[in-house]
Image: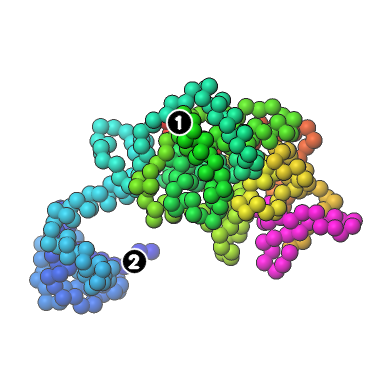
Amino acid sequence: MTSGLEVVWTQTPTQWSNYFFENLYKYEWVQTRSPAGAIQFEAKDGPEIIPDPFNPEKKRKPTMLVTDLTLRFDPEFDKISRRFLNDPQAFNEAFARAWFKLIHRDMGPKSRYMGPEVPKEDLIWQDPLPAAVHTPTAEDIATLKTAIADAGLSVSELVSVAWASASTFRGGDKRGGANGARLALEPQKSWPVNAIASRVLPTLQGIQQASGKASLADIIVLAGVVGIEQAAAAAGVQVSVPFAPGRVDARQDQTDVEAMDLLQPLADGFRNYRRVGGGISTETLLIDKAQQLTLTAPEMTVLVGGLRVLGANFDGSRHGVFTDRVGVLSNDFFANLLDMGTVWKAADEHAELFIGRDRKSGEEKYTATRVDLVFGSNSVLRALAEVYACSDARQKFVNDFVAAWTKVMNLDRFDL
């Protein structure tokens, strides 16, 4: 199937020119039909100056689509089109920039470009970053970790702020991530899902200013390192979470607020967050978020289970927090999720929130969302949950969580 539309806009269809705008404004247009019967427009009383695509000896009248005519008859588009009509050089420049953006938009930051033709100019849609000014040593990092640990922030706060910063990454176009610390800038700091930022960032900014040894972006990620190491130690597992310094802090004038706002998540199942209801199922949105973070099913599973017991829900709720040891990196989420002594029923007709009650006493034990319970209902995810629920899986669970966590923290580190 094709549209049935058949138009040739200019006298030189295989050569660059300004004929499109010249013809658009030169003629009046009347509705006609293509040879296939589709509605299009033809120049009223226009000369036959357009080459026929099939017979070089024939000419036809100029033709346009209704979308083309919009560029003239819509008041706002008309302003732009008239400028291009009267200033072909402005049109050439605008087209060149738009084309460059189109074919480079999914390549991520400028640092990923290769070859001798990389433009020197930094463009705002590339989410530019300043040059690095900090090179923290191992000693500096150890000192910063101590300062963070002594700052009075909970494990939940430390982990949540790091996840909020890094989880904006999108594998589809390589945008987002922790580098740049844009969590501290508009619009990210005002997103409802990032409410944690207003509570935690001032403390981390104070540490950064007092130290002067690392960027805020590095300190945010390092806060997550400290939180996870504390949580693992509380679970009886000693682990060293990998940390690669070298991030920088973007400025507000390097951030296109409107474009950056498109990274605001519709849902983030890792934090039990959903902006609006209806339409796509909540568990499907979790899968979409995981694929944007380039996570495998096991990585997604271990991260959800770990973030729940660490109390990383965006609003501090208890949904899916299947443990009485919040802040301890345990496998309690999986063990209690699969406990046959718990009966789950939807809280209302929307079936987004569920209540788990003791099978014998009927006493309420937990609340959960669809994201939480999918790890018990989906056959693939349940199999993964059963692995982590085992009584001897404590070390594996922590190791796998740390590996998946580190992957997310470094998704935008194209320099590593």
The mark found on residue 212 in the picture is: 1
Q: Quadrant of residue 233?
A: top right
Q: Position of residue 164 (x, y in %)?
A: 54, 46
Among numbered discs 2 and 1, the one appearing first in the sequence: 2
Q: Residue at x 74, y 30 (%)?
A: 236
Frontmost residue, 375 versus 123 = 123
What is the distance, in whole Å, between disc 2 and disc 1 at their CAs? Answer: 61 Å
Say whether residue 29 is left or right of residue 357: left
Tell me the amino acid under the disc marked 1: Gly
Tell me the amino acid under the disc marked 2: Ser
Mark 1 neighbour class, 10 Å CA radius: few under 14, some 14 to 19, many 20 or more:
some
Q: Residue at x 35, y 64 (%)?
A: 2
Say whether residue 285 is left or right of residue 239: left
Is 338 drawn above or below residue 369 in the view shown? above
**Quadrant of the rendering where the N terminus is positioned:** bottom left
**Quadrant of the rendering where the C terminus is positioned:** top left
User: Which residue lies under the disc numbered 2?
Assistant: 3
Mark in the foreground, 2 or 1: 1
Magenta stretch in the rendered image = 347-374
